[in-house]
Image (cartoon, helix red, strand yellow):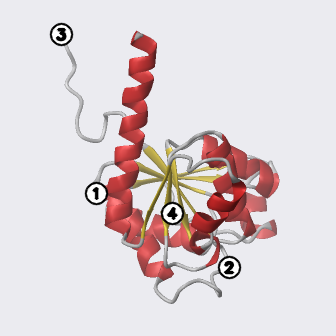
Amino acid sequence: MAVKLTRRQHLKYKICVSGAADTGHCAIDAHEKAEQIGREIARRDMVLVTGATVGIPYWAAKGAKEEGGIVIGLSPASSEAAHTKSYKLPTDYHDLIVYTGFEYSGRNLLLTRSADAVISICGRMGTLNEFTIAFEDNKPIGVLEGTGGAADEIRELVKKMHRGPGRIVYASDPKELLDLLIEEIESGKKLSKQIKSD
């Protein structure tokens, strides 16, 4: 007898939201757009994955949880005590936090590789690091333009690197960006199935 899965039991896409922890240089509405991205991820029954930090990822987590979504964080710390005391990072708005113990650069690698796609909002050097990991892995990437920081530089930077466009979609509206990103994830899955069947 086949078991019917409920809405919350089927396989979901995992979407990483990458962005500035220190948001002083971000656009004035960047936190609102981050919350909106989180809400949209939850509404579409997907899982939000963050670096379990403050700023943009925290606001995305807040938006997702307020919409009833699932949020998983990957911490640079090796324990909850180190996460809250040494790194001074929050634990709220997450259903689960994985304490990697790999500090920021190691955490960034695990974070991007654990997701089906990565969204860049505002951002500084760490966001750029997560972007380049995703780009090198040929992972779908959404760039929310107009949010300041790295997100507003990526389009030109990619052109100057002479490595092709990658699997990047750009938009300034959170809902539109997520629509485009889901299309990119699904087109990649179709292509992968086609290659396997050939």
Q: Please tell me whether mark 4 sits on a helix, a strand or a loop.
A: strand
| Amino acid residing under circle 3 | Met
Quarter assignment of residue 54: bottom right
Which of label 4 and label 2 is nearer to you?
A: 4
Residue occupying image coordinates x 65% and y 87%: 24
Residue occupying image coordinates x 70% and y 72%: 124
Q: Distance between the residues labelled 3 and 4?
A: 44 Å
Q: Please tell me whether mark 3 sits on a helix, a strand or a loop.
A: loop
Quarter assignment of residue 9: top left
| Amino acid residing under circle 2 | Asp
Specify the label residue 43 is tagged with: 1
Residue at which label 4 appears: 143
Using the rendered image of the protein, determine whether residue 76 is visible from the camera's viewpoint: yes
Q: Residues within 10 Å of mark 2 (few under 14, many from 20)?
A: some
| Amino acid residing under circle 1 | Arg
Which of label 3 and label 1 is nearer to you?
A: 1
Locate the C terminus by quadrant.
top left
Q: With 44 as the anchor, is 145 left or right in this view?
A: right
The numbered mark, 2 or 1, whose residue comes first in the sequence reads 2
Residue occupying image coordinates x 41% and y 73%: 172
The numbered mark, 4 or 2, whose residue comes first in the sequence reads 2
The numbered mark, 4 or 1, whose residue comes first in the sequence reads 1
The numbered mark, 3 or 1, whose residue comes first in the sequence reads 3
Q: Distance between the residues labelled 3 and 2?
A: 52 Å
In the depicted structure, whether residue 84 falls above or below residue 147? above
Residue at which label 3 appears: 1
Q: Distance between the residues labelled 2 and 1?
A: 27 Å
The numbered mark, 3 or 4, whose residue comes first in the sequence reads 3
Q: Residues within 10 Å of mark 4 (few under 14, many from 20)?
A: many
Q: Whole-percent x and y of residue 46? A: 37, 48
Q: Distance between the residues labelled 3 and 1?
A: 30 Å
Specify the label residue 22 is tagged with: 2
